[in-house]
Image (cartoon, grey):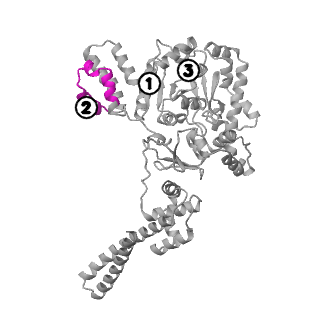
């Protein structure tokens, strides 16, 4: 595999890869950007074309093209390898030891892929299910593209087929394809349902969502795969593998609830649509979307449950710095039905989507409530949304635009105070978006800078200095072995190399090294002088005259050397 990864790195430039995901700006020999892996206003993410690596001084994210694609796309190494190999036009070849190492996970992906094919084959024989999908507005091309299938109304049809093809029950269970009852007997997870495969960003099947197409009392409309090694529902958005490029290009994302809503939206040409697919929107979902755009239009169903879900999703998105708009659907229709009726109405609805505060305010005005009830509803529904708006200037703009002070008879300064006192709903935010930069700012001390230079020399990043000579000088000044010194800095090696690149470029002058060495000696001498002065005070208090004379002489010698360094630098 090492040969394959080397070939890919030779054919694809890291700037090209990362630049296809985020906007990069030239910064000397490197490139910089706002980090896609944590919130920040000032760019602290740097890419080095020379070393083929990246480093974020804010959150510590680092690596090469493979680790970037893994982290950005939320896939494993094999998935990243597959994506980059296709991009580079390199044929994937695995050595025996690589296959053995990846065998189990690969088997799980194979099991899911084969299950998807079984469901596709089943659908081709079930006219009733096909007719239902077409009645809902899906074309044959969409059904094929999204690999929609069908699970027979049978307790073990899928299990028996997979057993014949060599998959074990343990593998099926680990994929969520079968379940086990209390008596340890296994049975198919999905029965008598239309099956929608869920894909990862490497377009591998990782889960399923099954929908009933006949009304059945006491049966859930949708049934999703359980969480598995391959599928984490709080981190997976249905359709994202196709939507990601369109979101990046168009600059906004449309968020819907169900599979049919997404399929109809994408079929109508809105490829920037994703679905939460039967689970509540999470900060992990938003972390994925924010890497591409901070603009989101929420288009949930226009029923009571959908309105509540919209409000919660909007508050969460606002709290994480999104610009949130709401798409209003007239009547009781959901997005899928509206698009099936007339795609042009959907296009107009997207165009007319309104900021969440505007949407909520206009809904409140339409209710024609008494003054007392209006104020009460305003405080319960509008103020929490205003409180979640990230900046005061945006809060003031919305208050002024809707003339809220006139309608509520509350002066702006008092209204702002009330907003500040309004509790903001707390969410379990993910590390991937909510964490603040915990990596401390670089310390500009000479020892740290000299180690930066040494590491850069070892990696061929800079030249112009004799490494061993530099090591020897540092050891003499500090009176320590290099291995002891190295221990305290090696964990920050990547960061230190990037610091050198940013400060010195590819070539460091001898005079700059000499200056660092003198600064290091000066720091060491000042520390020694302080220690000697403390010892001198103790000796004087204890009237140890002989010791006092020795210490006075040592202090004078250190002072003289400091004076020489200062005069030389001047």
Classed neighbour count for the residue bearing mark 3: other residues with Cα under 10 Å, few (<14), some (14–19), many (≥20): many
Q: Nearer the viewer, mark 2 or mark 3?
A: 2
Magenta segment range?
Answer: 394-423
Residue 527, numbered circle = none
Let me know if residue 65 appears in the view.
yes
Label 1 element class: strand
Label 2 element class: helix
Q: CA distance from mark 1 to mark 3?
A: 18 Å
Pick whichever, 79 or 102, lies toward us: 79
Label 3 belongs to which residue? 261
Going by the image, does 420 lie left or right of 8?
A: left
Q: CA distance from mark 1 to mark 2?
A: 25 Å
Q: CA distance from mark 2 to mark 3?
A: 41 Å
Taking the magenta stretch, the answer to whether it contains residue 396 is yes
Label 3 near label 1: C-beta < 8 Å? Answer: no
Q: Can you give x and y, in whole percent of width and height, for residue 426 in the image?
A: 38, 35
Q: Can you give x and y, in whole percent of width and height, for residue 480 in the image?
A: 48, 73
Label 1 belongs to which residue? 325
Q: Residue reaching furthest bottom?
A: 546
Q: Can you give x and y, in whole percent of width and height, for residue 526 in the image?
A: 36, 71
Compared to residue 48, the image places residue 359 above or below, namely above
Q: Nearer the viewer, mark 1 or mark 3?
A: 1
Question: Which residue does the image show at 49% across and 68% down from the upper left?
Answer: 485
Tag 3 or tag 2, which sits nearer the N-term?
Answer: 3
Label 3 element class: helix
Classed neighbour count for the residue bearing mark 2: other residues with Cα under 10 Å, few (<14), some (14–19), many (≥20): few
Judged by its main secondary structure, the magenta piece is helix
Label 2 belongs to which residue? 417
Question: Which residue does the image show at 46% across and 11% down from the upper left?
Answer: 331
Tag 3 or tag 1, which sits nearer the N-term?
Answer: 3
Tag 2 or tag 1, which sits nearer the N-term?
Answer: 1
Label 3 near label 2: C-beta < 8 Å? Answer: no
């Amino acid at each position: 595999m090492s040969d394959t990864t080397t070939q890919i790195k030779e054919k694809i430039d890291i700037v090209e890869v990362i630049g296809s995901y985020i906007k990069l700006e030239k910064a000397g020999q490197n490139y910089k950007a706002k980090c896609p892996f944590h919130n920040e206003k000032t760019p602290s993410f740097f890419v080095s074309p020379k070393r083929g690596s990246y480093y974020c001084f804010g959150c510590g994210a680092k690596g090469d093209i493979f680790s970037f694609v893994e982290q950005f796309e939320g896939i494993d190494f094999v998935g990243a390898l597959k994506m980059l190999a296709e991009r580079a036009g390199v044929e994937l070849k695995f050595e025996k030891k690589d296959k053995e190492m990846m065998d189990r996970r690969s088997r799980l992906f194979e099991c899911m892929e084969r299950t998807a094919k079984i469901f596709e084959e089943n659908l081709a024989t079930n006219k009733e299910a096909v007719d239902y999908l077409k009645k809902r507005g899906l074309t044959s091309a969409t059904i094929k593209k999204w690999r929609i299938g069908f699970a027979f109304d049978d307790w073990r049809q899928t299990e028996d087929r997979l057993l014949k093809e060599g998959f074990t029950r343990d593998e099926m269970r680990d994929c969520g394809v079968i379940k086990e009852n209390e008596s340890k007997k296994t049975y198919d997870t999905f029965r008598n349902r239309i099956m929608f495969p869920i894909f990862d960003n490497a377009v591998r099947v990782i889960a399923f969502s099954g929908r009933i197409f006949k009304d059945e009392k006491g049966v859930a409309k949708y049934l999703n795969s359980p969480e598995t090694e391959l599928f984490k529902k709080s981190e997976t958005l249905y359709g994202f593998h196709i939507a990601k490029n369109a979101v990046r290009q168009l600059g906004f994302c449309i968020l819907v609830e169900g599979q049919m809503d997404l399929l109809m939206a994408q079929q109508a040409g809105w490829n920037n649509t994703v679905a939460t697919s039967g689970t509540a929107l999470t900060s992990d979902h938003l972390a994925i979307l924010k890497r591409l755009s901070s603009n989101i239009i929420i288009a949930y169903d226009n029923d009571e449950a959908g309105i509540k879900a919209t409000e919660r999703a909007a508050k969460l998105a606002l709290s994480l710095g999104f610009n949130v708009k709401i798409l209003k659907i007239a009547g009781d229709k959901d997005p899928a039905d509206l698009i099936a009726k007339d795609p042009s109405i959907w296009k107009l609805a997207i165009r007319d989507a309104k900021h969440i505060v505007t949407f909520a305010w206009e809904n409140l005005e339409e209710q024609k409530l008494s003054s007392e009830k209006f104020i009460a509803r305003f405080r319960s529904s509008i103020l929490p949304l205003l409180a979640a708006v990230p900046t005061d200037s945006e809060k003031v703009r919305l208050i002024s635009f809707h003339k809220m002070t006139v309608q509520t008879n509350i002066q702006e300064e008092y209204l702002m105070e009330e907003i500040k006192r309004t509790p903001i709903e707390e969410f379990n935010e993910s590390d991937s978006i909510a964490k603040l930069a915990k990596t401390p700012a670089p310390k500009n001390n000479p020892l740290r800078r000299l180690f930066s230079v040494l590491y850069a020399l070892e990696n061929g990043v800079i030249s112009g200095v004799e490494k061993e000579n530099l090591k020897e000088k540092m050891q003499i000044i500090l009176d320590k072995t290099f291995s002891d010194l190295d221990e305290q800095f090696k964990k920050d090696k990547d960061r230190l190399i990037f610091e050198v690149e940013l400060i010195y470029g590819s070539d460091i002058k001898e005079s700059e090294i000499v200056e660092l060495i003198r600064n290091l000696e000066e720091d060491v001498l000042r520390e020694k002088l302080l220690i000697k002065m403390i010892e001198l005070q103790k000796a004087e208090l204890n009237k140890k005259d002989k010791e006092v004379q020795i210490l006075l002489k040592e202090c004078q010698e250190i002072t003289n050397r400091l004076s020489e360094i200062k005069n030389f630098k001047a």
